[in-house]
Amino acid sequence: MKKKVIYALNVLIVAFTLLGLGVMVSNHGDGGLLSSSGWENLKYFTVLSNLFCGIVATVFLARGIAGGKGKKEPGPKGEKEPGPKGEKEPGPKGEKEPGPKGEKEPGPKGEKEPGPKGEKEPGLGMMRAKLMAATAVAVTFLMIAGFFGPIYGWLPLYQGSNLEFHLIVPVFAMIEICLLEGPLPFSSAVMAGVPALVYGCVYLGNILINGKGEWPDTNDWYGFMNWGFGIAMVIFGMVVAVSFAVACLLRFINSKVCKR
């Protein structure tokens, strides 16, 4: 049941990411607060993190479909092929190859069976990508709800594609990572802060190189420089710290839910 819920959540993440992307691209005017026109929205951490989350969910579903096909083939073949082979080729091959086959087949089968079982739990790479994606969109969710919301008001921040990117996808992603069973070492929580760190460095670096600019063509689209460059650095430092804290929290909840 949990596995079905996880796959359903991934389908919803992909669907709402595509929906939000479609609404974003078709917007050529005011798509809500903290949004620009069309593809210009790709400069926002919100959009980038949601797209990353959608891509990871797509890969997860693709692996699940491929793994499902791999599981269906060995079962029927293992049951249907041994019978006919045992009846059609017992004489000629039954004397020469029964021994080796009988000894070699159980071995690989024994090795292949744990494989599909291992596929039920995502590997370390996928779990890290999942935690990284969930953390990134969770930070977006928290920044809107706890920082920008009180400043600009919450309703304008959930208009247009922001409804999917600020609320729906983040909530689904956070729920999913808490249910997903797989390896999540402490290093995964550290790595989950990398997207915010990289984005912050590029954001501030762009301002240092090209200047702040004037609205609406400003390079400080989040307005962090309104309090000075030093405060902007502190804010991004806090965002990275919050990313790490959120990743640790999600990892902790995951360990309790999955009882690891």
Image (cartoon, rainbow, N blue to C red):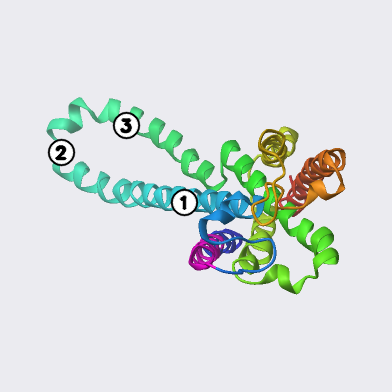
Q: Amino acid at mark 1?
A: Gly
Q: Position of residue 117 (x, y in %)?
A: 51, 44
Q: In the image, which is nearer the foreground, mark 1 or mark 2?
A: 1
Of callouts 1 and 2, the N-terminal one: 1
Query: If the image is split into quadrants, where does the N terminus sit?
Result: bottom right
Count residues near mark 1 (Cα–Cα under 10 Å), then give few for <14, some for 14-19, many for 20+: some
Does residue 85 appear to the left or right of 54 in the view shown? left
The span picked out in magenta is 13-28
What is the spatial separation of the Cα atoms under label 3 and label 1, in whole angstroms? 31 Å
What's the distance in space between the residues labelled 3 and 2, CA to CA?
14 Å
- According to the picture, the residue beneath numbered tag 2 turns out to be 89
Q: Position of residue 109 (x, y in %)?
A: 40, 37
Compare marks 3 and 2 and give the one earlier in the sequence.
2
Residue 22 belongs to magenta span: yes
Q: Which residue corresponds to mark 1?
A: 64
Q: Earlier in the sequence, mark 3 or mark 1?
A: 1
In the image, is residue 92 part of the stretch drawn in magenta? Answer: no
Is the magenta region chiefly helix, strand or loop? helix
Tell me the kind of residue under disc 2: Glu
- Residue 103: name its quadrant: top left
What distance separates the C-alpha of mark 1 from that of mark 2?
36 Å
Taking the spot 60% from the left edge, 42% from the top edge, the residue there is 129
**As drawn, 161 above or below 92:** below
CB under 8 Å between callouts 3 and 1? no
Residue 102: which numbered mark, if any?
3
Q: Which residue appears farthest toward the bottom when viewing the image? A: 155
Question: Residue 14, position in %: x, y?
Answer: 52, 60
Looking at the rendered structure, the kind of residue marked 3 is: Gly
